Image (spheres, helix red, strand yellow):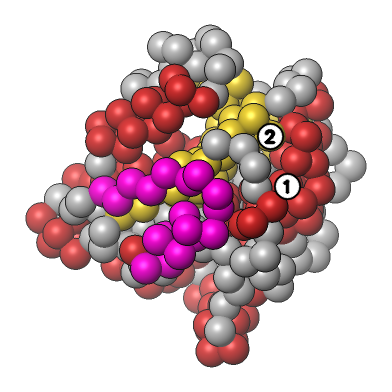
Amino acid sequence: MILRGDDASLFYEERGEGPDVVMLHPYPSDHGYWLPMAGYLESRFHLILPDLRGLGRSGTGEGTVTMAKLAGDLLRLCDELKIGRATFVGCSVGGYVLFEFWRRWRERVNALVLMDTRPGVDSDEGRAGRLKNAEDVLQKGPEWAIELMLPKLLSPVTMSSRLDIVQRARATMRLGTAAGLAAVQRGMAERADSTLTLSEIDVPVLVLGGEDDAPSPVSELEGMARGIRGAELKIVRRAGHFAAFEQPEEVGRLVRDFLERNGR
């Protein structure tokens, strides 16, 4: 489905029936990131799987893809589908968007799953690296960026011995354009610090991530869970930043259990 807009059109897919669960994928994938685990949820829940602005089949619009723009897109999608309150799942940049969405429209949030993400901003070095990557991808193209990132997104065991998973992960990134990837990288570099937001979150929260996640290591996940009153923490073995893609059965089971208790 396509949600038209003056600035950028958004592609999204709906699966299943039941309480609404909106799932925001990581960079540089599209909504296909969720499909391996969707089968564990769609028999009991209505899943809404958008491609974030600048990625997949969604448009980029003008300028930097900021977290404010992405949060606004999320609100527009919920309004279009007449979703008053929902449970939101966000992985990586999807988590950054949910922090921004919470600050602006927390009354629309029933519960949160924060997956392989972190509340803090990049270091000066990390921010400079994102901005350089944005410039490089415009010159070298999206395939260069994807191959550069894959070892950072998947666990070492997946990269070395699960080549089918590597290929499928790569396929979720194939629609990314150089302009879209660069615009999202710039937006992540500009994102606000959400550390203080953690103490304001007063809905049920599951913090989940892979034990081999390099961009959002276990120590970050543990700190985020401690900062949110009552948050649950689950660490998935033999998985990296793309935990839901690498271990869909385990992550699907954990998320379904959380949703059964908190997402209805």
Q: Is residue 224 magenta?
A: yes
Amino acid residing under circle 2: Val
Residue identified by numbered label 1:
101
What is the span of residues highlighted in magenta in the rendered image?
219-236
Q: Say which of marks 1 and 2 sits in front.
A: 2
Q: Earlier in the sequence, mark 1 or mark 2?
A: 1
In this orientation, does residue 233 appear? yes
**Position of residue 138 measured from the top left corner of the image (x, y, whole percent):** 60, 73
In screen coordinates, is 10 left or right of 37? right
- Residue drawn at x 72%, y 47% as measured from the top left: 102
- Residue drawn at x 50%, y 76% as measured from the top left: 140
Residue identified by numbered label 2:
109
Q: Nearer the viewer, residue 36 or 100?
A: 100
**Position of residue 86 measured from the top left corner of the image (x, y, whole percent):** 65, 27
Amino acid residing under circle 1: Phe
**Position of residue 60 measured from the top left corner of the image (x, y, whole percent):** 72, 53
Q: Nearer the viewer, residue 123 or 6?
A: 123
Q: Is residue 257 above or below residue 228?
A: above
